[in-house]
Image: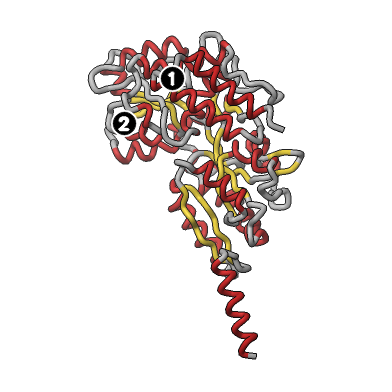
Amino acid sequence: MKLKKLAVIATAMTMLASGVAFAGDVTWWTPNFNEARAREIVAKFENANPNVKVKLEITTSDGLPQRVLTALQSGAAPEVIDVQHAWINGYAQNDLVLSVDDVLKDRDDYIPAALDYATWNSKLWGIPYRIETHAIIYNKGAFKDAGLDPNKPPQTWDELVATAKALSKGKMSGFGITGGGEMGNTIFRSLPFIWMNGGDMISADGKKALVNQPAAVAAVKFYTDFFKNKQAPASTLENDGTALRRLFIAETVAAYQSGQFDIASIKKENPKIDIGVMQIPHPADKKTAALLGGWSFVIPKSAKNPTDAKKLVGFLAEAENQGALTDTFPARKSAMSLPRFSDPILTVFKEMLPYGRAVPNNKNWIQITQAYFDGIQRILLGDEDVQKSMDGAAKDIQALLDQK
């Protein structure tokens, strides 16, 4: 009997050491910008489900794509992970996540494009909870100081270039772009310029790299020239979206592309800034574009407790909870009617939503965007001109597309 007890204890210790979760334990990886709201919702969930204990692990954007992919591939993933929409198809095609068709309720209440992101082979592999597109946030006072009318912001590329030039005086940079940090920052800000110019990163059938074609090259040149022409900060190669927001708050960047999630921080940290928001300028005679982004919940195939994971995800997907968690727009239409989404300063961000596009569905999308991002950095460093750099990126991307 004593030997049996010792064997049971030893088995339990081994399970603990190997990270095996017990029934009722759910580990949820969520980004740091969600932390305060996530903790409130976890308390609410545990109150309604006393037999389930949720452990929050807070993630940061820098290096997150690779961290999540490594966890999924290693079989040591948590039960629930918040991931960007664009990553999901790759996980599904590589058999790394569970289908959540049995979790989703009220499919008709979701923005269709958000569900498209998470759909592959006619199955749903993630539950979207947050959607967003960028607009241009600008300092109306800086416009006035430069002799510009803040109520008539630029609408075309040529007008944006002229405006950035007029705003770039002394310590002020006219238009901030990203070139560092997590690569998604730069994809979000530069890929829409390629789209609105009639180009793309890869072909619609996923067979050919297009990033070195004339329309794409012209758009990449337009984007990177803000740095080359000293209209973007000298720190561009290190700057991610957070850095741009801080520079805007410090009144050393007059305008930059971002989402409504930056508005609250700007108002809090520098309330004297008169904030303007405009649609992203476009080439003359063409329409604007934006990357429809956001976040979804996925359940790894290796999750130790998928039953309670689905219970948590179902709870998080409820309209009230989804609206409370996101700091942009919710993926559910009914959640959009919550009072917090009716602030007039959000009007332009809402106007940009119909112009939002999903990125291509490709199992190697993360690696494809890394190749493109590396090319952008080569241009910003001055190592290569735009055409040569995009030729190199296209070669790397084509190799990924040719993989079976």
| Residue behind mark 1 | 379
Classify mark 2: helix, strand or loop. Answer: helix
**Quick check: 214 above or below 99?**
above
Q: Residue at x 66, y 38 (%)?
A: 89
**348 horizontally vs 149: left or right:** right
| Residue behind mark 2 | 247
**Quick check: 235 above or below 151?**
below
Q: Residue at x 58, y 61 (%)?
A: 26
Q: Which quarter of the picture shows residue 142?
A: top left
| Quarter that holds the C terminus | top right
Residue 360 x %, y %: 64, 29
In-front residue for pair 237/178: 237
| N-term mark: 1 or 2 | 2
Q: Which quarter of the picture shows residue 84?
A: top right
Name the residue furthest left.
170
**Quick check: 202 above or below 75?**
above
Q: Amino acid at mark 1?
A: Ile
- Image depth: mark 1 or mark 2 in front: 1
| Quarter that holds the N terminus | bottom right
Q: Amino acid at mark 2?
A: Leu
In-front residue for pair 276/312: 312
**170 horizontally vs 82: left or right:** left
Residue 75 x %, y %: 62, 54
Residue 195 x %, y %: 57, 19
Q: Residue at x 43, y 27 (%)?
A: 257
Q: 10 Å neighbourhood of mark 1: few (<14), some, or many (≥20)?
A: many
Classify mark 1: helix, strand or loop. Answer: helix
